[in-house]
Amino acid sequence: MRFVTLVDRINQTLGTLAGGCALVMLLAQVFSVVTRYAFGYGIIAVQESVIYAHATTFLLGAGLVLRENGHVRVDVFYSTMSQRARHIVDLVGLTVFVMPVAGVIFWLGLPYVARSWATLEGSRQSGGLPAVFLLKTMLLVFAVSVALQAIAILIRLFSGDLEQGWKRADGHG
């Protein structure tokens, strides 16, 4: 269970960083709009930072969303199922969909990210951010965090502690 606790903490930290990215996105967007419409001056790096923060918010927050049981599911059916049926749905969903998709994203993303790092890829726009390689790295962080969280949930499922595994903020785990 130490592994499960560690994964939960990692995804909590990544989720906190995602929240920070959302704030950065908001502030950068407001700044961009004000400078463009009030002063007629656009800054490419600020506009790109909105895009980077938006992508990073979702990519870093995905593991936490899975941990909190906040992911997309057809709750109309799931909520009416017995506890045993829910466990089967969770088992199938995690092993047939979540983990293979995370694995494919990591597998296909690794050479993509490696090429970006090899050239320290930057923006194609003059005055843009010189850190495209860092943004692309978030794809790998996403895949690993989601896969690890799926494993942690599966461990809870097999240990009979799934109710503790879905740490929903609303208490409806």
Image (cartoon, rainbow, N blue to C red):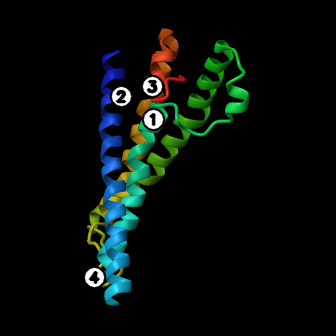
Secondary structure of residue under mark 3: loop
Q: Name the foreground residue: 52 vs 110.
A: 52
Task: Say which amino acid is labelled 4.
Answer: Gly
As drawn, the residue found furthest toward the bottom would be: 40
> Is 24 drawn above or below residue 149 in the view shown?
below
Residue under label 3: 167
Real-space CA distance between mark 2 and mark 4, rounded to the nearest whole angstrom: 38 Å
Nearest to N terminus: mark 2 or mark 1: 2
Q: Where is residue 23 shown, x and y percent of the image?
A: 33, 56
Marks 2 and 1, how far apart at CA:
12 Å
**Label 3, label 4: how many angstroms apart (C-alpha)?**
43 Å
Q: Position of residue 81 (x, y in %)?
A: 71, 19
Residue 27, x across and y down, in percent: 31, 64
Which residue carries the number 2 mark? Answer: 8
- Give the Cα distance between marks 1 and 3: 17 Å
Q: Secondary structure at mark 1?
A: helix
Does residue 131 appear left or right of residue 97 in this picture? left
How far apart in space, not on screen, are marks 2 and 3 (Cα)? 10 Å
Q: Is residue 118 left or right of residue 70?
A: left
User: How would you rate the neighbour count of disc 4 (Cα within 10 Å): few for under 14, some for 14-19, many for 20 or more?
Assistant: few
In contact (CB < 8 Å): disc 2 and disc 3: yes
Q: Residue furthest top?
A: 160
State how far apart marks 1 and 4 are (Cα).
36 Å
For disc 1, the neighbor class at 10 Å (few under 14, some 14 to 19, many from 20) is: many
Q: Residue at x 35, y 48 (%)?
A: 19
Q: Position of residue 61 (x, y in %)?
A: 41, 44
Which numbered circle lies on residue 127? 4
Q: Mark 3 or mark 2, which is nearer the start of the sequence? A: 2
For the residue pair 115 and 62, the one nearer the viewer reads as 62
> As shown in the figure, which amino acid type bears the numbered disc 2?
Asp
Task: Give the residue at mark 1.
Answer: 147
Which part of the image, by quadrant, shows the N terminus?
A: top left
